[in-house]
Amino acid sequence: METEWSMDTKIIHEHQFPDPHTGAISQTIVPAVAYAFPDSETAAAVVAGEEEGVYYGRYGNPTSRTLEKKIAALEGGEDALGVSSGMAAISIALLGFLKHGDHVLVTKDVYGGTYSFLTSLAPRFGIQFDFVDCTDTDLIVKAIKPNTKAVYIETPSNPRLTILDIEAISEVCKARQLPVIVDNTFMSPCLQKPLELGADVVVHSATKYINGHGDVLAGFIVGKKDAIQFMRKKLMGDLGQNLNAWDAFLILRGMKTMALRVERHCGNARKIAEYLESHPFIDKVFYPGLKSHPQHELARKQMKGMGGIVSFEVKGGLVEGKKLINSLKLAMISFSLGDPETLVQHPASMTHASIPQEERIKFGITDGLIRISVGLEDADDIIQDFDQALTALFPASETKITTK
Ligand SMILES: *Cc1c(COP(=O)(O)O)cnc(C)c1O
């Protein structure tokens, strides 16, 4: 009898076997674009999706296929599609469910690229949308229109780490035959399984925790076999958004340590969050693992760990926020997340600088808000770095370093 492996074992072994010709344990890279078939009937069956196989590089390749199967297994989905970036995954998933004249409900603090796709590109193709506060399922139900065809959420949100109840949202949507798409990037399959909670589709930016090394752009869509097959052939293939074999190899390699990395990210993030919460120059800390987080209990119920992203508001505002991140010596100012290095960004002067202040504040982007993607360094070194930067920020005050 086959035993069911635990997540940590699956991450390493699922769908990966020694190469049958050489015995090589690490993944073989197959860069071939074209594949030969024994006869025309087999070729036709593979193209039709009736038989497993690859036939042309734009529709997939054996290296990314290994990775797709692994991601599908980790998320508990029927199938997965590997694409060229997280935004490719998001746009393909949305276009897979929406056509001209359709409407989608979207959580209000959605990733910037998704916001841009919906507000600037989707309307050109007749797709309508509304942003709703998805922390309240009644508001979702009220916002549903006759032409609503999907609900799109992201939890925890960026950068304020608002938690949405995936199970409750899926339940109200299921009753109305509305597919729920969840961006699971911040959690990785290690920490949150939206499909087990009732969602229909998971999307990922594998650029972040899944690859984890800041050297590959990639995305995944996980869902039902027929939906994935449609997206592979009609969206990824026709738009040319495939994941290449080299990047798939790097992700397969990076993923071997995903469980370990994610555990360390979570442990470090908790320490940084606790340190910041006790600091007199910090007004507010956003981290689902803190008791002070308004949805701490929901986070504990739905997530296996609290993730590696911590946001906080420094006293003062725009000037102090900028000055603080400019004084950091270990943490780097950068737009990405999920890397081994601790990365910080100041939304008011960076990602959201083009939005007028009043509008920004409506999205919860206050002037002193800073997002940290806590890295894999020693937590005490990260804390020391923030400590020296905070001390430099308000040099007149007497503060004590609150950790060793
Ligand atoms: C980075 C990110 C994306 C976009 O991913 P890319 O790989 O950069 O295209 C989407 N959603 C979230 C939550 C992200 O952090």
Image (tube, rainbow, N blue to C red):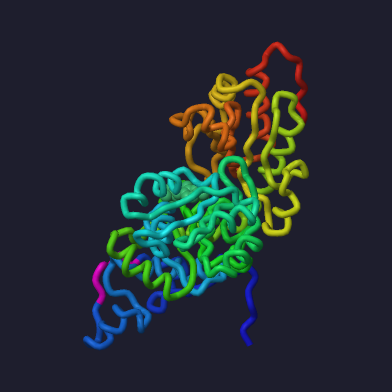
Does residue 341 appear left or right of residue 393 in this picture? left
Residue 282, image x and y in percent?
Answer: 70, 28
Which residues fall within the magenta stretch?
30-35
Residue in the picture at 62% in, 55% down: 260
Residue 140 vs 385, above or below: the answer is: below
Viewer-proximal residue, 351 or 247?
Answer: 351
Q: Which of 89/342 is in front?
A: 89
**Position of 374 compared to 122: left or right?**
right
Instruction: Indicate the quadrant where residue 321 lies.
Output: top right
- Looking at the image, the residue that sits furthest to the top is 396
Looking at the rendering, which quadrant does residue 402 occupy? top right
Q: Main secondary structure of the magenta part?
A: loop
Image x and y of residue 313, in percent:
64, 30
Q: Position of residue 232 (x, y in %)?
A: 36, 68
Return the residue nearer the eye: 165 or 148: 148
Viewer-proximal residue among 205 and 26: 205
Viewport quadrant of the C terminus: top right
> Residue, x 47% and y 53% (percent of image)?
205
Q: Residue pushed farthest left?
A: 40
Q: Where is residue 403 drawn, in percent x and y?
A: 76, 31
On the question of residue 248 being in view, the answer is: no
Q: Is residue 234 something that shows in the picture?
A: yes
Quarter of the picture holding the N terminus: bottom right
Depicted 154 relative to depicted 46: above or below: above
Q: Is residue 94 above or below residue 320?
A: below
